[in-house]
Image (cartoon, helix red, strand yellow):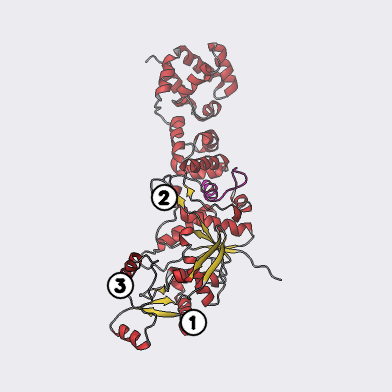
Amino acid sequence: MTTTICKTRFAPSPTGYLHLGNVRTALFNALLARRRQGRFLLRVEDTDRERSRPEYVAALLEDLRWLGLDWQEGPDIGGPHPPYAQSERTAIYADYYQRLEETNQVYPCFCTPAELALSRKTQLAAGRPPRYAGTCARLNVAEQQARCDRGLQPTLRFRTPVGQKVQFTDLARGPQQFASDDIGDFIIRRADGGPQFFFANAVDDALMGVTHLLRGEDHLSNTPRQLLLLEALHLPAPHYGHLALIVGADSGPLSKREGHFSVRELRSSGYLPEALLNYLARLGHSYEHDHWMPLAELAENFALERLGRAPAHYDEAQLLHWQSEAVQRAAPEQLWVWLESAVGKEVPITCREAFVAAVRPNIRFPADAVFWAERLFGAELALSEDSRALIAQTDSAFFSHALAAYAEYGAVYQPLMDDLKRRTGVKGKALFMPLRAALTGELHGPELARILTLVPADLARRRLEAAGRPV
């Protein structure tokens, strides 16, 4: 007895950059495949000839790899069911159109968009659900030819069986049932000869062996159509699951302002891939424990029964939380690669490791590291208002003593602080806050011990001297 291997897929259209909704779909399918020791397939659905672009294909491959969502079959690595771009599968679709034509399960439709719009309006006015009225369903061969002779380009419609119930168990939403009479005959090939989305989509999933498919709930109405098509073609259907959509704070579609950003934009603004993965894995799916998880653990604990049915609300605060977690847990060398383009010129080569260790608790993004690089290594120091006020309130003799202690012990923190305490007679905040303010221009930030080892000796002396001068 053989066991069917779980195979999931992600099939984006390369008409733009991947946004959060796309990536969550890819992530959930990848997690399900990993959870079941299966395969994750990538297919490019580029049948929209006007909007599909090669640069978007390259970008989606790069972005998915950056996230760590590797696939075992796809356009760049091949697999047992090539090609993996729909624009290269035209002959395959033509074969299956012919099969339907031979069994009289389809017919050409010459209705114009204006005629279809009028029919829809009439049905709605009569209180009936709008569906195709079957105008061209009974045309004979001569009538069809006459329309072709007039230069009309027909679409191809599927003859939906009458009086049937289409039923399936949704992986996310449970039992579903649709009446075929409410669906009507639908288009499976456009007038320009291109395949309709759900035809090519269903045929490819069947031929490529996709067993489980998670996608947005906006595709739910396509599912009964695809099941009818696959049954007519004697092709296997995957198990479908429809995910609740991601919405904004007002429960409406995500706006650009609220988070409908491309992965490319999030990446360029400094988000780490692990942050996006931990956030998106919980957007419409719950985990028993809400702690940080690497990708392997996210997959190990992914469960279909934990998929939510209510809309998933985008929450920037949560995304920022996972970004902080990602920064704190990243390997030092990974953090430096992340920071190098922003601070590589300011941070001396010999200080890179120490700089990463010092600023890690105080940064979320590379821009935050730029702030501290300027305060630790910049020739000019801009004091915050609070630091300026504290320095003004501190006896100038304090900074003279600090210079003396620094001359004796340098950046060795504990002896330096013990000596300064002995010289000034102060302790606690009164001891280290003026020192921090003089050295960095801030009252809060990296540990003072780390600051002392990073600020160059001549710069530290100049700053302490400046703090001790009367204003």
- Image coordinates of residue 6 in percent, x first then y, are 61, 64
Secondary structure at badge 3 equals: helix
Q: Farthest residue toward the left?
A: 150
Residue bearing the label numbered 3: 115
Quarter-wise, where is residue 405 in the image? top right
Q: How crowded is mark 1: few (under 14 residues within 10 Å), some or many (20 or more)?
A: some
Mark 2 belongs to which amino acid?
Answer: Leu
The one nearer the camera, 142 or 345, is: 142
The magenta-colored residue range is 275-293
Query: Which residue was labeled with disc 2?
Result: 254
Mark 3 vs mark 1: give the one in front: 3
- Residue 266 position (above or below residue 360): below
Magenta span includes 394? no
What percent of the width, then of the height, locates residue 133?
A: 37, 74
Instruction: Between residue 268 and residue 20, name the one nearer to us.
Output: 20
- Is residue 291 shown in magenta? yes
Pick the residue in front: 353 or 24. 24
Q: Residues within 10 Å of mark 3 (few under 14, many from 20)?
A: few
Q: Which amino acid, by three-letter code, is at mark 1?
A: Arg
Q: Which residue is drawn at the image coordinates 46% and 64% (left, top)?
A: 221
Disc on the earlier residue, 2 or 1: 1
Residue beneath disc 1: 99
Q: Report the quarter where the N terminus lies.
A: bottom right
Q: Does the residue at mark 2 contact the one at mark 1 (Cβ under 8 Å)?
A: no
